[in-house]
Image (cartoon, coloured by chain):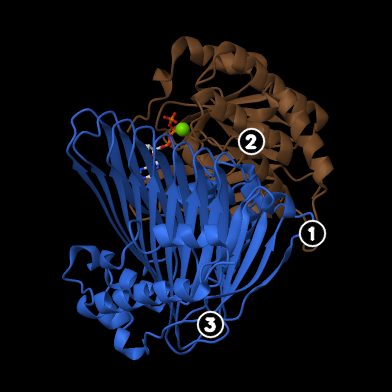
């Protein structure tokens, strides 16, 4: 049993430091290049919510039990208002030394050590930005996933975040460490009711894939309206390792995602997939970066979305091939389908290349439903609504077919159902 | 109703919807149930426009005349209503639908033909689809490909007839289905159409083509020549041979 009081005071020191960073960091405005499409002062004035740093000591230990049901799941973890409440792990996975635990309340010495080495430091330090600092100061709990050397966790681990009330800032952290030659996939979902008062949900995700490890990370956001969903995700990919991410944005009123993958050593590769469907007055802002820091690295980004009503999406993506990162392949594509006259999409793909022997491409399109395609479907007996639904699902579904494993069948089904739901009400 | 022509077009005129470009100019054409008709005519004479007007394409506006399908006026019907009533058009240029597999597309199209609350029997559907794929000599994996996405010209045309085989229309309008097919594919596709016609002798077919070659495989009862938006001559299969030799010089509009 680890000494929890030193562990907790270490965590609190990190929080206090992050809080001072937060206070000294100005709130981003549209004057900054990275925030030009999202006017926080108008969409979500931070002054309107109460943000207070509080030190956290032992909170309630989550329930922990064996996962007995024969599900296609290696483990499950549930968070309510940012606190881990339940953990279930497949005993077979547990016995391989795979860790799935609460960051705040783990009593496991190994995981505490992993957290001390990695949390809020070399991956996503509070200095990364205003919201990264805010999350690092205000988080009360989060998920740590640790996969020992050469262990392959076949089925995905699932995380579920829910909110009990609005009017709060809920900050959660996720830390995934995959040791050499290991494999894990984690699927997290965010759900809540609609809230009339402004609430914020903040998620900071740190992923480290050591040599030859592979991590698949899927996040599905279907929060209620009234919520500002703020995400910072950063992945460090070592030699021959692979980190694939899929971020699905369906809910909330405003969402801002800052996603960065760093390919640190030769052979590192990453697929970054994204999918969004906006309606009414939803506003989604994606800010992505692909950093190639070593030769023979590969990244492939594909973000696709559909926008209905008055919704709006912005995409700002950058590929940075640093000097010396020869023979790297880097791709970036953003496509948006506008379903209404009022919807709007801005897309700004970017390249910064300091090596001369690389393959890079970037592109973006914003288009409407093609009337010839609609007519083709009508001429086969589809109703206009069915035709639009099929085209939109086909357009978006393309992203999900790029998920590397069949293990995500349930995610694909859930996302498809959720998109269909929105199409019906749109 | 039973002796009504499958398609009865009287004095049909049509123009481009938002421009003053007349294309169909008082066109007359009648097809009895079960007959096979071919329309030939120079580029730009309005053959595809006729097909699209019959299918209800919104780019064209009917400015006069009538089109009756089994005695029922077509022109007020929505495109999807016409399809559900049994009209099928194979497109000269089929569109691509990324991310939608042929199987999913056809399943949804058949489901749309059922009433509310009725569920398509998936086993029956599988059988139907397999049978159609066998008829068109395509691999079973064909059905998993997204509709026309990345297809060769010939594959697109095969896919049109595959759809026809599954949807089983009572009036099929095939717009240059033979263009872009190599000789083997032409035989397969023609054989497919002939088999469907044999299975359902009541099915009426309107072939639009530039090539007499197609009519060696699919024997038409009548051949029509269309020039400048109207039918200028009607005859038997021998008319196609004559056209092949002489071209359309004799029918160029006198202007
Ligand atoms: N939407 C449109 N807008 C403007 N002009 C059009 C439109 N559709 C057709 N036309 C014109 O009408 C005429 C008839 O076109 P159509 O496609 O029906 O000819 P076609 O007989 O099918 O020719 P082809 O043998 O080359 O396929 C052409 O001159 C064409 O350019
Ligand atoms: Mg044509």
Q: Is label 2 in contact with label 3 (beta carbons under 8 Å)? A: no
Label 3, secondary structure: give it.
Answer: loop
Relative to residue B222, is residue B129 depicted above or below? Answer: below
Q: Is residue A318 left or right of residue B215?
A: left
- The circle drawn on residue B144 is 2
Relative to residue A77, is residue A211 depicted above or below? Answer: above
Disc 1 Cβ-to-ligand 1 distance below 8 Å? no
Which quadrant of the structure image shows residue B3?
Answer: top right
The colour assigned to chain A within the rendered structure: blue
Q: Is label 1 in contact with label 3 (beta carbons under 8 Å)? A: no
Cα distance between the residues tagged 2 and 1 = 36 Å
Cα distance between the residues tagged 2 and 3 = 39 Å
Cα distance between the residues tagged 1 and 3 = 33 Å
Residue A360 appears in the rendering = yes
How packed is label 1: few (under 14 Cα within 10 Å), some, or many (20 or more)?
Answer: few
Disc 3 Cβ-to-ligand 1 distance below 8 Å? no
Q: Residue placed at 45% from the left, 86% from the top?
A: A168
Label 2, secondary structure: give it.
Answer: helix
Q: Position of residue A194 (x, y in %)?
A: 53, 82
Chain where mark 2 sits: B
Residue to which mark 3 is pinned: A194
The colour assigned to chain B within the rendered structure: brown
How packed is label 2: few (under 14 Cα within 10 Å), some, or many (20 or more)?
Answer: few
Residue to which mark 1 is pinned: A68
Label 1, secondary structure: give it.
Answer: loop
How packed is label 3: few (under 14 Cα within 10 Å), some, or many (20 or more)?
Answer: some
Relative to residue A8, is residue B156 depicted above or below? Answer: above
């Amino acid at each position: 049993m680890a000494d929890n009081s030193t562990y907790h005071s270490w965590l609190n020191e990190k929080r206090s430091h992050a809080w001072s960073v937060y206070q000294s960091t100005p709130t981003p405005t549209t004057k900054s290049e990275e925030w030009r499409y999202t006017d926080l002062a108008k969409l979500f004035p931070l002054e309107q919510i109460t943000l207070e740093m509080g030190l956290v000591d032992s909170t309630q230990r989550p329930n922990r039990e064996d996962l007995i049901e024969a599900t296609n799941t290696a483990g499950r973890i549930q968070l309510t208002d940012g606190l881990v409440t339940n953990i279930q792990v497949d005993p077979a996975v547990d016995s391989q030394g795979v860790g799935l635990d609460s960051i705040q309340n783990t009593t496991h010495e190994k995981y505490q050590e992993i957290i001390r080495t990695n949390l809020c430091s070399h991956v996503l330090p509070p200095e990364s930005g205003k919201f990264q600092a805010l999350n690092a100061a205000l988080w009360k709990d989060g998920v740590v996933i640790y996969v020992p050397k050469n262990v392959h966790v076949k089925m995905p681990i699932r995380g579920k975040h829910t909110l009990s009330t609005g009017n709060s800032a809920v900050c959660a952290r996720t830390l995934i460490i995959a040791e050499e030659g290991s494999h894990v996939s984690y699927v997290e979902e965010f759900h809540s009711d609609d809230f009339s008062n402004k609430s914020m949900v903040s998620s900071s995700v740190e992923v480290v894939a050591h040599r030859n490890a592979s991590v698949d990370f899927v996040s599905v956001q279907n929060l209620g309206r009234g919520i500002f969903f703020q995400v910072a995700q950063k992945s460090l990919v070592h030699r021959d390792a692979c980190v694939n991410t899929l971020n699905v944005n369906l809910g909330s009123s405003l969402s801002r995602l800052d996603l960065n993958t760093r390919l640190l050593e030769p052979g590192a590769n990453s697929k970054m997939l994204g999918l969004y469907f906006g309606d009414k007055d939803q506003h989604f802002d994606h800010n992505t970066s692909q950093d190639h820091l070593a030769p023979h690295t590969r990244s492939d980004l594909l973000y696709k979305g559909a926008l209905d009503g008055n919704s709006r999406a912005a995409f700002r993506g950058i590929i940075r091939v640093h000097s010396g990162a020869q023979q790297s392949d880097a791709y970036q594509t953003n496509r948006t389908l506008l379903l209404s006259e009022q919807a709007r999409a801005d897309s700004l793909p970017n390249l910064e290349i300091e090596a001369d022997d690389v393959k890079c491409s970037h592109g973006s399109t914003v288009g409407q439903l093609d009337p010839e395609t609609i007519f083709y479907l009508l001429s086969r007996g589809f109703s206009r609504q069915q035709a639009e639904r099929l085209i939109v699902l086909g357009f978006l579904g393309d992203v999900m077919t790029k998920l590397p494993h069949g293990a995500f069948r349930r995610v694909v089904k859930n996302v498809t159902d959720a998109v269909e739901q929105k199409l019906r009400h749109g | 109703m039973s002796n009504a022509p499958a398609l009865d077009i009287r004095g049909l005129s049509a123009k481009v919807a938002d421009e003053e470009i007349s294309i169909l100019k008082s066109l007359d054409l009648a097809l009895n149930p079960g007959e096979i008709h071919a329309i030939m005519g120079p580029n730009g004479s309005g053959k595809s426009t006729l097909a699209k007007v019959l299918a209800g394409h919104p780019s064209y506006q009917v400015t006069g005349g009538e089109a009756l399908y089994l005695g029922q006026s077509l022109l007020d019907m929505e495109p999807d209503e016409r399809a559900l009533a049994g009209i099928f058009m194979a497109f000269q240029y089929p569109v691509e639908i990324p991310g939608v597999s042929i199987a999913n597309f056809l399943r949804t199209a058949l489901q749309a033909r059922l009433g509310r609350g009725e569920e398509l029997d998936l086993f029956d559907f599988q059988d139907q689809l397999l049978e159609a794929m066998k008829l068109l000599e395509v691999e079973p994996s064909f059905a998993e490909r997204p509709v026309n996405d990345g297809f060769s010209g010939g594959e697109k045309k095969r896919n049109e007839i595959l759809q026809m085989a599954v949807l089983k229309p009572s009036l099929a309008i095939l717009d240059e289905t033979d263009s872009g097919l190599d000789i083997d594919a032409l035989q397969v596709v023609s054989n497919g159409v002939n088999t469907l016609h044999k299975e359902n002798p009541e099915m009426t077919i309107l072939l639009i083509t530039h090539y007499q070659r197609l009519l060696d495989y699919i024997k038409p009862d009548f051949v029509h020549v269309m020039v400048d938006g109207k039918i200028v001559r009607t005859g038997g299969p021998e008319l196609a041979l004559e056209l092949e030799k002489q071209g359309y010089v004799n029918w160029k509009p006198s202007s």
